[in-house]
Every structure is written in C-alpha cells, then in structure tokens.
Image (spheres, rainbow, N blue to C red):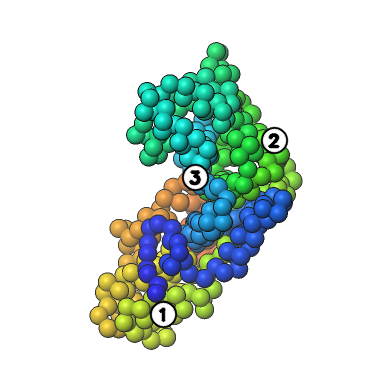
Amino acid sequence: MIKFSFGTPVTRENFFDRESETRFLSSRIASLRKGARNDVAVIGPRRVGKSSLVLQVLEKARASGLTCVFVDCEGHDFVSFVQEFNNAVLSPVIEKSTKMKLEKMLKEGGRNLVAVFSEVIGTVKAVEVSPTELLNSLRIRIEFENAGAGKNREEEALELLKSTFSLIEKTGDFAVFFDEFQETIRFKTGGTQFLPVFRRLSQYNKKCAYVYTGSSIGMMKYVFANPESPLAGNADILYVNPFPKSVSTDFLKEGFKDRGLTVDQKTLEALVDASGGYPAYLNWIGLRCVDLSKKTVSGQIALQVVREMTAQISPLKQMAEKQLAKLGTKTRLVLKAMSAGCEEPSQISASAKTTNAYVYLNRLQEYGL
C-alpha cells in the first residue's frame, strides 16, 4: 500500500521504486565485507528522494551487521561539524564495546570513566557526561591530552577529527553517510581548506565505506569530478533523477486506488506533469487530492491542487523560496530571465542587465538549478 507522506524521508513500505539505485549503492557498501572499499557520491536535486534512498540502504546495511552512521553537513562550521561527526561515530562504538562498563561506573559515581574512554579512543584527558544523556543520546564532551594549552577551537577540532578517523579504523565494518556534503567546501581548518585534510585522514580507512550525498549538483561535481579537487576520482557517482512519467503515474494511480479513489488518464497526466516527477511533490499532490476527493479525483480538483502548489503558503513554494534565498541578486535576475523564455546567453544578459550571463549560469548550475 502506498502511503502518501510529505516533509520527511520515507523508508520501508513507504519506499517506492529506485530498485536499480538501491542495488547499486547496497552492492558498493557490501563490498567492504570482501575487503574492498568503494565510496559513492549520490548526486541529485533537492526533493528527488536522495535521503530516502540513502536511509533505505543504511537500514539494510545496519541489518547486515555494519555499523552505520548518518551525518548532516548542512548548517555547520568546521568545529560544529567535527563535533557532530565524532558524536555520530562514538555513539555506536560506546554502545557496542563499553556500555556495560560505563553503566557500572556511572552507578559507582563515574570513577575511572576517563580510563574507559581512553581504552576506546585513546589520549583522553577528561570526559564530561551526565547519566541520562549517556544512556539516551550519548552526547559527550571529551577533552584530549593534546587539546587546550594554547590551541584554538579549530586546532582542537582537528585533533578530534583525527581521533574520529582513528576510531573508525580501529573499530572496522563502518559505513558513514554524509548528507549535503558540498557544504564542507567552505570549512576552514586553521586557515587551510577542509577537503585536503579530509582526504588525508580518510584515504587509509580500509574498513569504512563513505557515502556522500549532495543537492548542489555543480558543487558536488567539483568535489568529485574536478581534477583540482582533492577528492576527485575518490567516489563512484550515482545520479538520482526525478521519476519518469510511467513511474510517477503508477505511484499516484496506486496511491489513489489504495484509498478507493478513481482518476481518469487526462487528470492523472496533469498531476504528473505538475510534479515534474519529484517524489516529494508527488506525495504532496497525492495528499491534497485525497483531502479534496470523495470517490473521484476530478479534473477540477486537480486544477485546484496545481494552483495551490504556487500559493504563498504552499510548502512547495516555501521550499523553492528557501533554495532561491541562497542566490545573489544578479543570479536571481538571470533565473527570472530564463523563466520568461530567454534561451540564448545574449537574451539572458539583456534581460538581466548583465554583461556576462555565463558567470551566473555557472552559479545556478552549482546549486543544481
């Protein structure tokens, strides 16, 4: 049964199609058990279903015995990213290897807690943790032997990053999933770029597979396909595209049928065209049609739903506005010129009142627009 769901990634029975993408990604991760590390960059525009795909594969990999962690790179600077990454890696390791010891020590007042953590990740000077946090979410603040003493926050974070990769290699059978990885391009590590540091620390991890997802298509291509990038050639590329019309049609048709609703072919085609094949939009359209229909999804209802898509309070409109907010004024003018029908660079330049449209066209490509 298809359950229309909007706003969050879907898994298990709500996951639709993507058989070839799931097989591809799962096979790359599974090869880790055969001694071969095969990283993958999952690239596609926003709302196309990348997170749902990755979480579906993550769940299967975890069921097979791999230790899997998911790290969202969006909204971080270098220091907060490293803290998030370390916490994601440390949590399952602690749960697996030292939970019994830690629970016992917490009951005894936390004595020798530093020794327990040192046993797992080494060179720990101090640990700050409350019993409730430890047992529920494992939010832990760790001070390392080499941290402090004249080091700034970025230098301390770099030490923590090194320890995190060391812990991954020591533990083994790991799969790390980074979401919106292109955001790390702007990270600074003590004045240097993040990507060379990341490559240097991760390249010798033979017991961990890395999956990088990103919706800024041009930026992801730069990271993994530009010869100037430290990670160029380090990951196989998996493009996730909108559903073709046939799959989109089946999705809506089955969803309506499961709810006892009928729909004619012309109305169905109008809804599919409005969705562009994006799973998020298909789900929203399905939900609204169910809200408004009793027995039949009529052409009139379809027209109303399509109009609602561009209303100011529509979540789809808000998604678009959020993405466009990242663009500068000139880039937005170039996009507006294209939406008005300008196709040639000379036409776009004239409409947007800029001498070089190519600069802004490249920027739109970087953001996957």
Secondary structure of the residue carrying tag 3 is strand
- Residue under circle 2? 200
Where is 158 relative to 31, above or below?
A: above
Secondary structure of the residue carrying tag 2 is helix
- For label 3, the crowd category at 10 Å Cα-Cα, with few meaning under 14, some 14 to 19 and many 20 or more, is some
Asked where in the image residue 130 lies, by quadrant, the reply is top left
Residue occupying image coordinates x 34% and y 34% = 132
Residue 63 is situated, as x and y percent measured from the top left of the image, at 52, 56
Q: CA distance from mark 2 to mark 1?
A: 49 Å
Q: CA distance from mark 1 to mark 3?
A: 34 Å
Judge by depth and name the residue closer to the eye, 231 or 164: 164
Which mark is first along the chain, 2 or 3?
A: 3
Front tag of 2 and 1: 2
- Residue under circle 3? 72
Residue occupying image coordinates x 45% and y 61% = 11
Secondary structure of the residue carrying tag 1 is helix
Residue 12 is situated, as x and y percent measured from the top left of the image, at 45, 64
Task: Indicate which disc residue 166 carries.
Answer: none
Residue 20 is situated, as x and y percent measured from the top left of the image, at 60, 68
Residue found at the very far bottom of the displayed protein: 264
Where is 87 relative to 306, above or below?
A: above
Task: Indicate which disc residue 253 carries.
Answer: 1
Q: Amino acid at mark 1?
A: Lys
Where is 242 relative to 94, above or below?
A: below
Residue 221 is situated, as x and y percent measured from the top left of the image, at 65, 51
- For label 2, the crowd category at 10 Å Cα-Cα, with few meaning under 14, some 14 to 19 and many 20 or more, is few
